Image: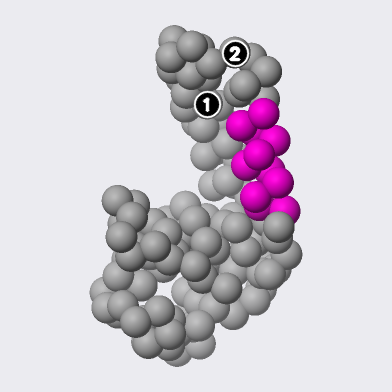
């Protein structure tokens, strides 16, 4: 399920987070699902355990997962944290749109990029 690009400028831990988000959107993961252990994930992806650990810690901090000592890590969407992030992200989107228009994108082009992204997530 996890498709990592080892030559990308995006750090591997961030790619794990992004792939988990895609998995949630595509229905591969649901609330309460158990994620592979850090050791299992590292072995499967052929990466260092500390990279997976960093991804899991970040996902916990942003309200995507919960780690229970001795049991593992589980999808546990924290609606309060997500609501706060959504409110903050609105400003980020506005700044991204401003940059897009500054670079010469039209409203239709921005909407097409949005649709293209949605299609990619739906595949």
Report helix, strand or loop for mark 2: loop
Q: Is residue 22 above or below residue 107?
A: below
Quarter-of-image position of residue 41: bottom left
Report helix, strand or loop for mark 1: helix
Quarter-of-image position of residue 4: bottom left
Q: Position of residue 85 (x, y in %)?
A: 52, 39
Which color scheme does this rendered protein use? Answer: one colour
Does the magenta run of residues contain 76? Answer: no
Q: Position of residue 9 (x, y in %)?
A: 29, 51
Report whether residue 98 is seen: no
Which residue is tagged 2? Answer: 106
Region rendered in magenta: 112-122
Left or right, residue 32 beside residue 85:
right
Give whichever of 55, 70 is nearer the camera. Answer: 55
Give whichever of 98, 36 is nearer the camera. Answer: 98
Give whichever of 40, 7 is nearer the camera. Answer: 7
Which residue is tagged 1? Answer: 93
């Amino acid at each position: 399920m996890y498709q990592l690009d080892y030559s990308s400028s995006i750090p591997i831990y961030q790619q794990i987070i992004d792939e988990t988000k895609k998995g949630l959107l595509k229905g591969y993961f649901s609330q309460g699902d158990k994620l592979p252990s850090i050791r299992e994930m590292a072995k499967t992806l052929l990466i260092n355990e500390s990279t997976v650990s960093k991804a899991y810690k970040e996902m916990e901090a942003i309200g995507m997962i919960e780690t229970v000592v001795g049991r593992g890590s589980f999808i546990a969407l924290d609606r309060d944290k997500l609501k706060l992030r959504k409110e903050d992200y609105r400003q980020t989107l506005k700044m991204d749109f401003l940059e897009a228009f500054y670079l010469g994108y039209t409203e239709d082009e921005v909407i097409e990029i949005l649709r293209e992204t949605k299609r990619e997530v739906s595949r």
